[in-house]
Image (cartoon, rainbow, N blue to C red):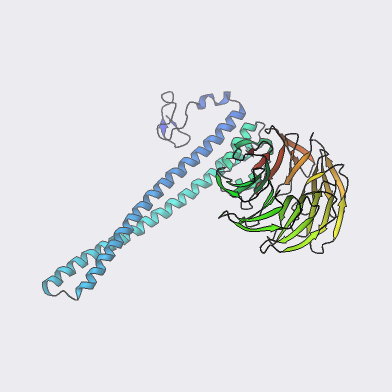
């Protein structure tokens, strides 16, 4: 007799290929294990260890649910008895003689039943506690037997093995699994998980909420759409602009969305209701770009009128107007400490300002044509700029000097974003590709070429697990493992 590796049910070899209790595939006999390649053996160990843990967990959860049902029933019965006792106590003063004796007998019976129920409830609570402890032990067993193999598989030569191990580890809540996932580089495994085609024209802007629950898209069709980041379902469509939506940004608490438009205005939206809270009108040309400060107090906007404006996000008060660029301001970004503002322009330059003193700190002039996007690393040390000269340049913000040029794109680079850990830079280009770079080594890690037209916008989720892109062909692509 042999035992199922998952539920331990005994079976006779050669008589069945599937466990009659848990359904596990028993066709791979231990007699042949030495003939199986090591990679397949490791894969089989991973699957078996995880399935064993899941089977134990399901058994315990089923028993706990059963006990909880019994406890609920007993609690309802006890509540009913309390109601009867209350009714009896209320009427006792009106009852005398033989009727009083009968009522007392009933009361005694009810009290006895109540005591019995209380004892039963206590026993059920003890059993529930024991089963929960057993469940915790089973989960620990999962960690001991399966997690090490899964973590090892993350470094396997096979991408299929890596992907399987990664997806299984995401189901674990153990600190060990979370640490392994944080250290694992998922970008070689990225693939297009979903394509959304709800917009009617080019998707010029993508923003993911800081709470990692939703994302927004802005389009030449003059609308903004809010999507669920988990299932990619459309939550709502925001209508109100009379021109292309060129830029969008979430507030730090994910409750407010700001949008810039070709109608020369900035609109402030309540994400939950979809209502316009305010409209900022002050620019004399297209609003190409908006950014919100880390404290959620200030909104910066850049326009075709060659200016940058600072607004009080809550009141709409215009705080400052910066001039200096000789052409359209295409991109603005605010450092994570809220102290620096970077702007990129069609005049081929990038300007860095101190937001506290309003002083112009640096002007970078090494791009040969229009600069379309800028981003700052979370540690506020490096600025990345993207240009129509097909390059991305990395700058030292403290020293104000060029550090490195990334030149793998074959078309203008119109959008960039940096991961929350500051290790990865994502770029989207008119060459129809998205490129993923290691900021530390300046190496190209991956090129995604699923788009068949210009990539106009990219954004990466707060947990660095999902990448979203918008393109000239009105499509949104979600990339993940």
Which percent across, then down, holds residue 458?
Answer: 69, 43
Which residue: 51% across, 27% down?
Answer: 30
| Residue 379 percent coordinates (x, y) | 76, 54
Residue sitting nearer the eye, 306 or 379: 306
Q: In this view, does 56 lie above or below 292?
A: above
Q: Quadrant of the N terminus?
A: top left
**Residue in front for this viewpoint, 28 or 103:** 103
The one of 408 and 465 positioned closer to us in this rendering: 408
Counting the numbered discs, the total is 0
Return the residue found at the far left. Answer: 98
Please say if 234 is above or below 95: above
* Residue 400, visible in the rendered structure: no
Image side of residue 120 versus residue 427, left or right: left
Res. 152 image quadrant:
top right
Which quadrant is home to the C terminus?
Answer: top right
Looking at the image, is 420 positioned above or below residue 163?
below
Asked if residue 77 can be seen in this view, the reply is yes
Q: Where is residue 318 in the image (x, y as percent from the top left)?
A: 73, 62
Front-lying residue, 214 or 278:
278
In x, y percent, where is residue 454? 72, 36
Q: Which residue is drawn at 83% across and 39% down?
A: 389
């Amino acid at each position: 007799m042999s035992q199922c590796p998952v539920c331990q049910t005994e079976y006779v070899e050669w008589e069945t290929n599937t466990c009659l209790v848990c359904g596990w595939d028993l066709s791979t006999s231990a007699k042949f294990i030495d003939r199986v390649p090591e990679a397949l053996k490791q894969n089989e160990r991973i699957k078996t260890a995880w399935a064993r843990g899941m089977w134990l967990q399901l058994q315990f959860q089923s028993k706990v649910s059963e006990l909880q049902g019994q406890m609920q029933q007993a609690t309802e019965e006890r509540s009913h008895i309390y109601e009867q006792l209350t009714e009896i106590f209320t009427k006792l003063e009106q009852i005398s003689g033989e009727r009083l004796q009968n009522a007392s007998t009933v009361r005694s019976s009810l009290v006895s039943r109540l005591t019995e129920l209380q004892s039963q409830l206590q026993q059920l609570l003890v059993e529930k506690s024991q089963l929960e402890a057993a469940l915790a032990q089973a989960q620990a067993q999962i960690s001991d037997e399966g997690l090490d193999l899964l973590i090892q598989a993350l470094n396997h030569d096979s991408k299929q093995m890596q992907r399987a191990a990664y997806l299984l580890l995401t189901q674990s809540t153990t600190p060990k699994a979370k640490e392994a996932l944080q250290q694992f580089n998922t970008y070689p495994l990225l693939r297009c998980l979903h394509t959304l085609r709800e917009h009617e024209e080019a998707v010029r802007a993508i923003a993911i909420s800081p709470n990692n629950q939703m994302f927004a898209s802005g389009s030449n069709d003059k609308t903004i759409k809010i999507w669920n980041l988990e299932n990619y379902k459309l939550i709502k469509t925001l209508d109100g602009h009379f021109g292309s939506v060129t830029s969008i940004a979430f507030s730090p608490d994910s409750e407010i969305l700001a949008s810039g438009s070709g109608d020369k205005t900035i609109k402030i939206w309540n994400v939950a209701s979809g209502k316009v809270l305010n409209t900022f009108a002050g620019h004399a040309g297209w609003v190409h770009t908006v950014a919100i400060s880390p404290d959620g107090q200030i909104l910066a906007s850049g326009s075709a009128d060659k200016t940058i404006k600072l607004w009080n996000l809550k009141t709409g008060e215009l705080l400052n107007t910066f001039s200096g660029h000789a052409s359209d301001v295409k991109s603005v970004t605010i450092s994570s400490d809220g102290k620096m503002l970077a702007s990129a322009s069609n005049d081929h330059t990038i300007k860095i300002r101190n937001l506290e003193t309003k002083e112009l700190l640096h002007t970078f002039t090494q791009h040969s044509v229009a600069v379309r996007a800028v981003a700052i690393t979370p540690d506020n040390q490096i600025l990345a700029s993207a240009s129509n000269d097909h390059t991305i340049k990395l700058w030292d913000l403290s020293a104000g000097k060029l550090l490195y040029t990334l030149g793998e794109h074959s078309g203008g680079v119109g959008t960039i974003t940096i991961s929350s850990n500051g290790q990865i830079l994502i770029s989207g280009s008119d060459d129809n590709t998205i490129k993923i770079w290691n900021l530390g080594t300046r190496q190209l890690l991956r090129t995604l070429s699923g788009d068949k037209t210009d990539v106009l916008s990219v954004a990466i989720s707060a947990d660095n697990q999902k990448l979203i892109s918008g393109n000239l062909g009105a499509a949104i692509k979600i990339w993940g493992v």
